[in-house]
């Protein structure tokens, strides 16, 4: 996947390793005088809704702990939300989002980090499916 939408970027920033994300965000703002935190990192809860696969009915499974933040960088708003209570990671996600939106000097590195995170997650998922494949039970249909 070459082109990433803003939704893709925010989604990936919410899931990638916090240490790499924070390090890159620090680089993005190291010499940047035009950074303003418009909404500081705030911990709260979000409703987790799932769809039951047979009847296809939606229901609320649980509330999940999440942290969100918003920044303005070079006049562009950036937003981030991550599960858990890691305020630094949520702020870093917002900074990296703003870096991409503003087409800043580190935007390509942010996108690369997002692509690497997605590729790693897809490889882990494929490995897990390969591990589980021998246990799949297939039923014969009787006419």
Image (cartoon, rainbow, N blue to C red):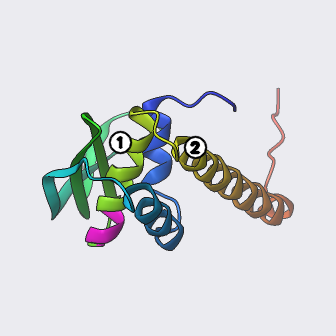
Residue at the spot 51% in from the left edge and 43% down from the top edge: 105
Cα distance, mark 2 to mark 1? 12 Å
Which quadrant of the figure contains the C terminus? Answer: top right
Which quadrant of the figure contains the N terminus? Answer: top right
* Residue 2 rendering spot, x and y as whole percentages: 69, 30
Secondary structure of residue under mark 1: helix
| Region in magenta | 86-90
Residue at the spot 26% in from the left edge and 72% down from the top edge: 85
Residue wearing tag 1: 98
* Foreground residue among 65 and 18: 18
Q: Residues within 10 Å of mark 2 (few under 14, many from 20)?
A: many
* Residue 60 rendering spot, x and y as whole percentages: 24, 49
Considering only order in the chain, which callout, 1 or 2, is on the residue closer to the N terminus? 1
* Foreground residue among 4 and 108: 108
* Foreground residue among 50 and 101: 101
Secondary structure of residue under mark 2: helix
Residue wearing tag 2: 111
* Residue 82 rendering spot, x and y as whole percentages: 34, 59
Q: Is residue 87 magenta?
A: yes
Q: Is residue 37 magenta?
A: no
Residue 84 to residue 9: above or below: below
Asked whether residue 22 appears in the rendered view, the answer is yes
């Amino acid at each position: 996947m070459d082109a990433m939408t803003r939704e893709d970027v925010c989604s990936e920033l919410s899931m990638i390793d916090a240490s790499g994300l924070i390090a890159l965000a620090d680089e993005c703002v190291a010499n940047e005088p035009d950074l303003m935190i418009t909404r500081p990192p705030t911990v709260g809860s979000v409703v987790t809704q799932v769809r039951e696969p047979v009847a296809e009915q939606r229901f609320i499974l649980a509330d999940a702990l999440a942290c969100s933040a918003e920044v303005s960088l070079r006049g562009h708003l950036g937003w981030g939300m991550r599960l858990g209570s890691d305020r630094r990671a949520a702020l870093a996600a917002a900074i990296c989002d703003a870096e991409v939106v503003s087409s800043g000097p580190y935007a390509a590195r942010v996108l690369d980090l997002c692509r690497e995170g997605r590729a790693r997650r897809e490889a882990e998922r494929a490995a897990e499916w390969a591990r589980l494949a021998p246990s799949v039970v297939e039923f014969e249909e009787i006419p």
